[in-house]
Every structure is written in C-alpha cells, then in structure tokens.
Amino acid sequence: MDISLRIRHPSIDPAEISEALGLKPRHSFKAGEVREASSGGSAGRHGQTYWLAPLEWPSSASLIEPSFLEATQARHPERDIKGLAEKIRSARKTSLDSSVETALFVALAQLNLRAAFLQQLLGEGGAVSLLIVLPPQSQDGFKIPLALSRLVVKLGIDLEFEVAEE
C-alpha cells in the first residue's frame, strides 16, 4: 500500500511545504513557473503550486522509543523488555503493512502534528489530499472508523482511493 500527500495552492513555494512537513516531494512546481509544452501545445505558466510526496512509514526500529525502553527496563529489571519490544515492533510492522485502517491512522497522526500548517494552506485557498493506492487483495473491503473520519474532517483532507492493478 502506498500513501502520498498532495497539496495544491494558489502561490506557496514548494520548498516551504517541504520544510514545514519534513518531506521530500516526488513531484512539485510553483505557481507562475514556466511549464513544459505538451505535445502540439504551447508552453505556459503553472496556474497554481503543486506538491506531491510519498508518506514514509516509521521504521520498525523507531516504533518503540529507546529511552522509554531503558527507563522501563530500569524499573522492572526482572522483565525481558527488549524481547517484548521486538514482539511489539514485529506486530506493528505487520499491521502497518497489511491494514488500510492502521496505515491511514499512522498517516493522519503524522499530519495531525502539522495541523496548523495544513489549516493555513486551506485558509489561503489550498487543497490537501491523501492518495491511497491499495493492493489488489484489499478489494475485500475495509472500514474507516468514526475517529479517523473525524480526524480527516478536522484536518480538511480529501481521501482518494485507488486499487493497484495486479
């Protein structure tokens, strides 16, 4: 499953988006920049800024904060905290790879940390979308829990789903 963030805006510099979100775009251009001529067409200028970046998932190693594990181990030396952490990492990694709901939750949680910036973009006439490309086996269905729906509304994000071809 791939999730990308797409932003359209009347005038913002794509570098400002990248800096505010801490993401590198796969594709971007700024409003007013010269666009390449399409076959048979003439070159013009982009009417708006466009920015698209894949959302990278945290590595399984970063899902459990090391300082938290050390503090927990110090408080409970009789427990195998490292072994438990590995089991949690493995379970979370599997969950992130296989569950649409979990992947969407992680993406929205990351974006919620930057809610003020997203609200600024929207207030300036921008649009924010999550593009979710699902593997073919996900056609069996999934549900978006109410809490996630509320977060989508709060953030002002459109969701676009596409099923990848086999």
Image (cartoon, rainbow, N blue to C red):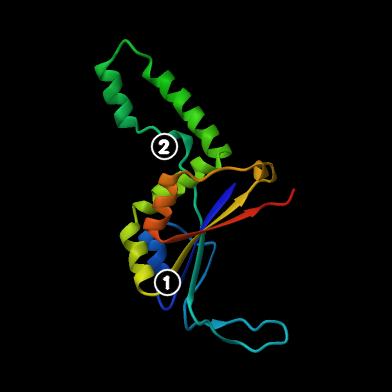
Expressed as whole percent of the image width and height from the top left, the position of residue 76 reads 28, 15
Q: Residue furthest left?
A: 75
Distance (Cα) linking label 2 and label 1: 32 Å
Label 2 neighbourhood size at 10 Å, few (<14), some (14-19), many (20+)?
few
Residue located at (34% from left, 64% from top): 119
Q: Considering depth in this image, is 23 or 125 the residue closer to the camera?
A: 125
Tally the marks. Answer: 2
Q: Amino acid at mark 1?
A: Gly
Residue located at (34% from left, 71% from top): 123
Q: Is residue 22 visible?
A: no
Residue 51 vertical position relative to residue 11 in the rendered view, above or below? above
Residue located at (36% from left, 52% from top): 112
At numbered mark 1, what does the secondary structure look like: helix, strand or loop? loop
Q: Residue furthest bottom?
A: 42
Q: Is residue 32 visible?
A: yes
Which of pointers 2 and 1 lies earlier in the amino acid sequence? Answer: 2
Which residue lies under the disc numbered 1? Answer: 126
Q: Amino acid at mark 2?
A: Ser
Residue located at (37% from left, 69% from top): 121
Which residue lies under the disc numbered 2? Answer: 62
Residue 133 vertical position relative to residue 13 in the rendered view, above or below? above
Q: Which mark is residue 42?
A: none
At numbered mark 2, what does the secondary structure look like: helix, strand or loop? helix
Expressed as whole percent of the image width and height from the top left, the position of residue 21 reads 39, 58
